[in-house]
Amino acid sequence: GDVDGVMNWMRNGKSDSEDPTGDFTRIDQMLPKKKGQKPKDRAREIESALDWMRNNDVSPVEVEPTDAGFQTVPSVPVSKRTPEERMNDVDDIMNWMRNPQDESMDPTGEFTRVDQ
């Protein structure tokens, strides 16, 4: 298995010569580090990820950065509502859910739009 290969790669300072495809490095970077994890357990975890990827025809390819980078998304305006107003909303919604045919329970049609 790959455990021995991963262990050799780890023992040799994670050198490129021990990881010619770069798969060990990419998977090692993807998997979260566990506090107090033994090297053998880490090697098994990397091997398991490689096995899963092979069995599911997935390649641990590196994601190329885009020129655009991150784009800021405009914020959604949120109205400040008091706890009492929010509780009234919950009551209104619960009443509407109990009686969805009663249009007077949803005069603005908001509940029906959200429920679709």
Image (cartoon, helix red, strand yellow):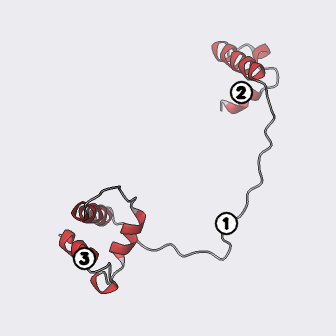
Quadrant in which residue 78 is drawn: top right
Q: Nearer the viewer, residue 103 or 62?
A: 62
Determine which of the numbered discs, if any, sits on residue 70 in the image: 1
- Disc 2 residue type? Thr
* CB under 8 Å between discs 1 and 2: no
In the picture, measured across the screen, residue 54 lies left or right of residue 73, that is: left
Quadrant in which residue 12 is drawn: bottom left
| Secondary-structure class at tag 3 | helix
> In the rendered view, would you say 75 is above or below 113?
below
- Residue in the image at 33% along x and 73% along y: 24
- Residue in the image at 38% along x and 59% along y: 33
Q: Can I make out residue 53 in this image?
A: yes
- Residue in the image at 69% along x and 32% along y: 114
Ranked by sequence position, the earlier of labels 1 and 2 is: 1
> In the rendered view, would you say 34 is above or below 102?
below
- Disc 3 residue type? Arg
- Residue in the image at 31% along x and 79% along y: 13
Separation (CA) of disc 2 from disc 3: 61 Å
- Residue beneath disc 3: 11
Dot 3: within a 10 Å radius of its alpha carbon, few (fewer than 14), some, or many (20 or more) residues?
few
Dot 1: within a 10 Å radius of its alpha carbon, few (fewer than 14), some, or many (20 or more) residues?
few
In the image as oriented, which residue stretches furthest toward the front?
A: 36
- Residue beneath disc 2: 112
Ranked by sequence position, the earlier of labels 2 and 3 is: 3
Q: Residue 109 location in percent, x, y? A: 78, 26
Tell which tag, 1 or 2, sits nearer the viewer.
1
Quadrant that contains the N terminus: bottom left
